[in-house]
């Protein structure tokens, strides 16, 4: 297939999506929640569990909202969904200035953030990027996810400094202004729903395909009845619960195995680097190799990381284990979109990815809670680590059962 020699506008769309994810709901409300946590406890004068409930409320509402965001992106304009969500997210963050001393106001605040932030998840962005790219879809999705990885690294320290200087309400409001001032206008100008709006074709091809990629694929009803879809979703849920639980409890896991506070801090930094590498690097392998095998290898490696933390006592083993788990956590978002697009096409991609990603988000809230329960009952992390190890390996094995792509690009590996 011939390619255009000049610059392809699809890469502008990828860069714009990365910017939106960098200053999106994940970076500000999820990755930075730990920075706000001490201020919440001190300001509302409640136990830590009461503040943690706000995070659980956010994840529960967000998990269900993501599916409907995907449905709206399929039926209408994903760009419009993203712009509306960005404007809502900025306005809600600014409204933090009027939150009083009642805890229910914090719960309402995070519930509203979950609804607006659902439009700032990778789901609507990935739908658009998948329309722009076919053969290089994995690479494009991986580069897009760099924005979320950088947000997880850069935003929390900035939040911490703003809280110290101005308080948590002002910090929220400042980031709300940043969302309205930076990604919102850039997306409104540069982000396009598909290449056909500019007279272009996916990947910059010059040969017109038999049918528009956005119209090729299964309906949501057909996807819902597919055993392959439920197999994928089950894998995303069990692996998501396992890696979330291990990453959230990483400092305690290392301390439980005799590691120092310095080791715990270093391991957390290693996870951040691995998360960024997983999100940016997995796309290259997804394009060049059969995606279920790539994902299976990544998830099996995460199982090896759990094993190293379970039995490791020395710093190198703990750090390698943290890196492998972080790598899987970073790659899973890319894997979800890529696999769903290759097996079910783009026709109902927003709804399908929204459902699968929503399950991943919900598992991210439930997994750490179950690990806490297991620790409280047994007095050790050995049992939950054993379960996490088995679940990640089970996910790796299940993915191998997936057959050839149904909607692959020409020359795709199998």
Image (cartoon, grey):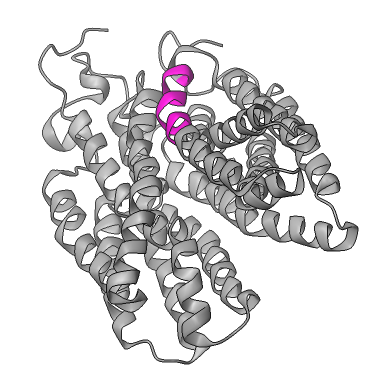
Closer to the camera in the image, 199 or 112: 112
> Is 281 within the magenta?
yes
Residue in the foreground of this view, choosing between 31 and 18: 31
Work out whether residue 297 can be spotted. Answer: yes
Against 108, residue 307 (above or below) is above
* Residue at position x 34%, y 54% in the image: 155
Q: Looking at the figure, which quarter contains the C terminus? A: top right
> Where is residue 42 drawn, in percent x and y?
50, 81
- Residue at 37% from the left image edge and 66% from the top image edge: 116
Count the labels in the image.
0
Was residue 396 drawn as part of the magenta stretch in this picture? Answer: no
Where is residue 310? Give x, y as percent: 78, 37
Q: Nearer the viewer, residue 102 or 5?
A: 102
Name which residue lies at 76% across and 43% down. 257
Q: Identify the residue shown where x is 69% and y is 21%.
A: 400
**Viewer-nearest residue: 152 or 194:** 152
Q: Is residue 31 above or below residue 98?
A: above
Q: Quadrant of residue 9?
A: top left
Q: Point out residue 290 in the picture as x, y percentages from the top left corner.
A: 55, 15
Q: Is residue 345 visible?
A: no
Residue 92: name its quadrant. Answer: bottom left
Q: Is residue 334 above or below residue 287?
A: below
Q: Could you tell whether 102 is left or right of 159 in the image?
A: right
Q: Position of residue 66 (x, y in %)?
A: 47, 57
What main secondary structure does the magenta stretch of the protein show?
Answer: helix
Q: Which residues are magenta?
A: 276-286
């Amino acid at each position: 297939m011939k390619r255009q020699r000049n610059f392809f506008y699809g890469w502008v769309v990828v860069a714009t999506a990365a910017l939106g994810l960098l200053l999106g709901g994940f970076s500000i409300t999820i990755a930075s929640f730990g920075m706000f946590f001490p201020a919440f406890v001190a300001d509302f004068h409640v136990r830590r569990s009461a503040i943690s409930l706000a995070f659980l409320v956010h994840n529960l509402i967000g998990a269900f909202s993501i599916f409907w965001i995907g449905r709206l992106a399929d039926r209408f304009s994903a760009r419009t969904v993203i712009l509306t969500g960005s404007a809502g997210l900025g306005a809600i963050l600014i409204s933090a200035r009027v939150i009083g001393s009642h805890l229910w106001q914090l719960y309402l605040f995070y519930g509203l953030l979950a609804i607006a932030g659902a439009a700032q998840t990778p789901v609507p962005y990935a739908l658009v990027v998948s329309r722009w790219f076919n053969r290089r879809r994995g690479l494009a999705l991986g580069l897009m996810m760099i924005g979320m990885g950088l947000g997880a690294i850069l935003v929390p320290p900035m939040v911490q400094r703003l809280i110290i200087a101005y308080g948590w309400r002002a910090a929220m409001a400042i980031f709300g202004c940043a969302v309205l001032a930076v990604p919102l206008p850039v997306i409104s100008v540069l982000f396009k729903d598909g290449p056909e709006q500019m007279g272009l074709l996916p990947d910059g091809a010059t040969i017109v395909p038999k049918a528009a990629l956005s119209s090729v694929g299964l309906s949501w009803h057909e996807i819902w009845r597919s055993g392959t879809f439920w197999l994928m979703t089950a894998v995303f849920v069990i692996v998501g619960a396992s890696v979330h639980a291990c990453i959230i409890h990483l400092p305690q896991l290392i301390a439980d195995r005799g590691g120092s506070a310095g080791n715990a801090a270093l391991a957390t930094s290693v996870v951040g680097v691995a998360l960024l590498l997983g999100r940016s690097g997995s796309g290259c392998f997804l394009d060049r190799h059969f995606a279920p095998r790539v994902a299976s290898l990544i998830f099996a490696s995460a199982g090896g990381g759990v094993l190293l933390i379970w039995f490791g006592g020395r710093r190198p083993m703990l750090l390698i284990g943290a890196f492998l788990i972080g790598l899987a956590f970073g790659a899973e978002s890319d894997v979800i979109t890529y696999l769903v697009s290759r097996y079910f096409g783009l026709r109902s991609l927003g709804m399908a990815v929204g459902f699968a990603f929503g399950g991943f988000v919900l598992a991210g809230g439930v997994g750490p809670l179950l690990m806490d329960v297991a620790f409280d009952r047994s007095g050790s992390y050995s049992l939950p680590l054993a379960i996490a190890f088995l679940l990640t390996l089970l996910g790796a094995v299940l993915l191998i059962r997936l057959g050839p792509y149904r909607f692959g690009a020409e020359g795709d590996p199998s």
